[in-house]
Amino acid sequence: MSYLRNYLNKIKPNFEEGGKLHAFRSVFDGFETFLYVPNDTAKTGVNIHDAIDSKRIMSMVVLALMPAMLFGMYNIGYQNYLAAGTLASASFLEVFFFGFLAVLPKILVSYIVGLGIEFAWAQWKGEEIQEGYLVSGILIPLIVPVGCPLWMLALACAFSVIFCKEIFGGTGMNIFNPAIAARMFLFFAYPSKMTGDTVWVAQDSIFGLGNTLPDGFTAATPLGQIGQGIAPDASICDMICGFIPGSIGETSLFAIALGAILLLWTGIASWRTMLSVFVGGGVLAFIFQTTGQSIEWWHHFVLGGFAFGAVFMATDPVTSCRTTCGQYIYGFLIGAMAIIIRVMNAGYPEGMMLAIFFGNMFAPMIDHFVVERNISKRLNRSKGVKE
């Protein structure tokens, strides 16, 4: 590592003011600050230097997403081999590497398009490259079905970076979660590639791995079956473990829980928001169950993107509430709204995406009223007025 550090120090003058590669200063700075913690300090004032900067936080979130991503890769292969009836004769490595080859192009497209726009934007504006897309670049491929075409994914990534980040001022200024915006763009622009029963299972072999399934092969998700009034054919164990059709990274509760533990242990995610999402969803799901809903209330937690959204997307520190009380309200609102959409709209069985989108929309207002309420209480306390 000392060799790399010395090499970067050697070429750095070329990218500084007056250097022959000064035009690419933001590109060099982006790579350098990703590899090493910046040692720059403020020129004035009293400051506390912390080694955990935003790039390190983003890297930790990406690490927390690894279990869901790796299991998603295996599940893609699992579903393909299961549909072809060859699962018993396939090895673990065959199943996993088929899924790996199916997911890898989506991850590459997401990062190439998203980071390419981020780099170009930074060069154009003469600013530092922002690190927010490190997380969005892995989130977007994990919340789409395996049947999503690469060109659609590229279009969605470009839309989310340009219209949901850069237009608002970049990382830390965006109102809506870019990954949610990308999925909403895909869902409403190309609904046939984002829902239904033909997009959840990879249907073509890749480099000799996997199976080519018959044309017209279908496989509905458990939520899709419930929306059609059909009892899910997956067992509770399969639902919890994640051996069901669904978006790439959203099926396994165990894998998501591992990521949640890491985020909570490092203090990156708010436990208040995370807990409130499940409480809000549980309360509404229980209420609907008492009215004759066909599934148990807790089944909502293990189906669709509920757990994934609660852990990795509702807790986004930029687009969620900042106040302590606001985080409880915000999380409860998202969980409750997700269940309402699922139950009340049979044509749209998955409600987490819209719930988080609307939660992002109301987060600033929630924080505003919480702050105003605190100011009012302190003013009354200073005047001796009892609450």
Image (cartoon, grey):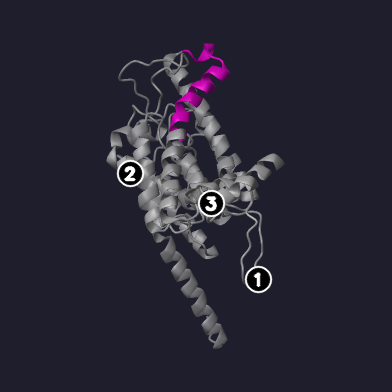
Dot 3 crowding, Cα within 10 Å, few <14, some 14–19, many 20+:
some
Q: CA distance from mark 3 to mark 1?
A: 32 Å
Span shown in magenta: 86-107
* Above or below, comparing residue 276 to residue 294 in the picture: below
Q: CA distance from mark 2 to mark 3?
A: 42 Å
Q: Which residue is mark 3?
A: 19
Q: At 59% from the left edge and 51% from the top edge, which residue is drawn?
A: 13
Judged left or right of residue 59, residue 246 is left
Sooner in the amino-acid sequence: mark 3 or mark 1: 3
The extreme right residue here reads 2
Total number of numbered discs in the rendering: 3
Cβ–Cβ under 8 Å for marks 2 and 3: no
Q: Secondary structure at mark 1?
A: loop
Q: At 42% from the left edge and 35% from the top edge, which residue is drawn?
A: 109
Q: Which residue is mark 1?
A: 46
Q: Secondary structure at mark 2?
A: helix
